[in-house]
Amino acid sequence: MLSEDIIISKIIEEPNIWFTVIDRGVKADFFPERKNQFLFIQKFYSDYGNIPSKEVFLENYPVWEFKKSEEKIEYWVDKLRKDKSFLIQSNGIESWLEERKNESDPDKLAKKIIKLATDLMNTSLARDISLKDIESEKKFYKEKKTNEGLQGLQTGLIHIDNQIRGLMSGDLGVIMGPPENFKTWLLNLISYNVWVGADVPCLFISKEMEDVAIRDRMSWFDFRFPLNAFERGVLGPELERRYFKALDKREERQDFIISAEEEMDQGAGVTFISAKIDRYKPKACFIDGAYLLSDDRGHEGWEGTKHVFRDLKRLARARQIPILVTTQPQRLKDSKGEPLRRKLIMEDVGSAYTISQDADYMIGVRQIAPDVIQVYKIKCRRGNSFDFQLQINFEEGIVRELGGEEIIEEENSNELLFD
């Protein structure tokens, strides 16, 4: 019970350790004596996006005594896991053996006992890989072969998918570019392609745009009608009829949740994102304006940004979903003081270089013509470089990758579209 008391106490007094507890696979079942308290914290976190304060916790558990310990939370979590594993094995294996007491082959029985004990431990080691697990490796290769090398959710953009092999579970991806350079549109497009192409539930969180604006963009990708007329509500009878008819067909798809609530402007951090993921159970999460998220530790500036991206990576791994975000580089102007329009390099990222330590890949984007953007690799832990153009014509409903002779020459103009 000591481990349980200390872990519960530390969670309430140090809310930022919540991810450490979750990362290590701790569940309510690990608390035989304090299960109700852990479930209370878990539900409060899911409902409100943060850990309950001492006052709130004591209102519900007035006789609770907070326990102190100099040891780190990792020690107590590991101890709790070991205690839980021991109880499972001592109780579970005993009943399991009773059911198989007539097994005639001792060797087979011994192997079954070992397998049972391993399964019952349910520790984070479950993600470790053994090079002697030959059948698993063969199966993994065959899956890659079947999917032509793609292992994750397809972005719908061939140049990107061929290199990063799709949005993979546990990955943190970053789309980076100066302001007003189509970052959000690219994130909208990829999220739409994942939602429709993979037919999976998705979560889109925006720190920069209203939810209805994001919804309109997703509808444009769906129906490709003239954007200006759609935004003003003057599509005309025929387009309007087709629009409403097509909307009805969305019932057949998985859900796509857009979250751009007022609470996003009230110090929302990664704990808020985590609560949304726990609530909606998406297979992919997209965050517009991740650099605007608050640091749950209370730091500001690039120190806070570093913590935010580190927590986002931990969240992606803990929930085993891909998270793709947009952000800005530190350097926004060139040596002449003009808005930065060339391709980004790591030096432009500046203090945000720490972001690259947690990001599995970083995609650069810049607008080179009114309806054309350049998309390129800044950093990628797997695959080779990519550099291509993407055309999005809002009035003609065109979305296509450009290559070879189709490449459009960059325009020297400041009158370009905004994010």
Image (cartoon, rainbow, N blue to C red):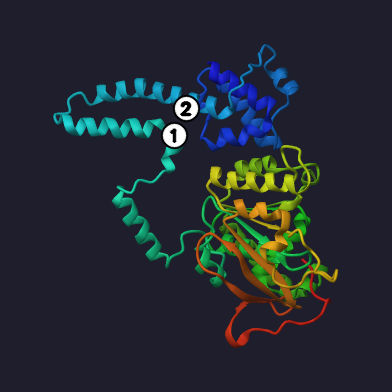
| Residue 373 tag number | none
Residue at 57%, 71% in the rendered image: 386
Picture layout, residue 375 above or below residue 105: below
- Residue 184 percent coordinates (x, y): 71, 63
Label 2: which residue?
A: 81
User: Mark 1 touching mark 2, by CB under 8 A?
Assistant: yes
Q: Is residue 257 visible?
A: no
- Crowd class of label 1 (few under 14; some 14 to 19; many from 20; radius 10 Å): some
Residue type for callout 2: Arg
Q: Quadrant of residue 19?
A: top right
**SS of the residue under disc 2:** helix
The alpha-carbon separation of the residues under discs 1 and 2 comes to: 7 Å
**SS of the residue under disc 1:** loop
Picture layout, residue 24 above or below residue 188: above
Residue at 58%, 28% in the rendered image: 73
- Residue 368 percent coordinates (x, y): 73, 77
- Residue 326 percent coordinates (x, y): 69, 58
Q: Residue furthest left?
A: 104
Q: Is residue 345 visible?
A: yes
Q: Nearer the viewer, residue 282 or 355?
A: 355
Q: In the shown orientation, is residue 199 left or right of residue 109?
A: right
Residue type for callout 1: Thr
Number of callouts = 2
Question: In the rendered structure, which disc, 1 or 2, sits on the residue that comes first in sequence?
Answer: 2
Q: Nearer the viewer, residue 190 or 69?
A: 69
Residue at 67%, 11% in the rendered image: 63
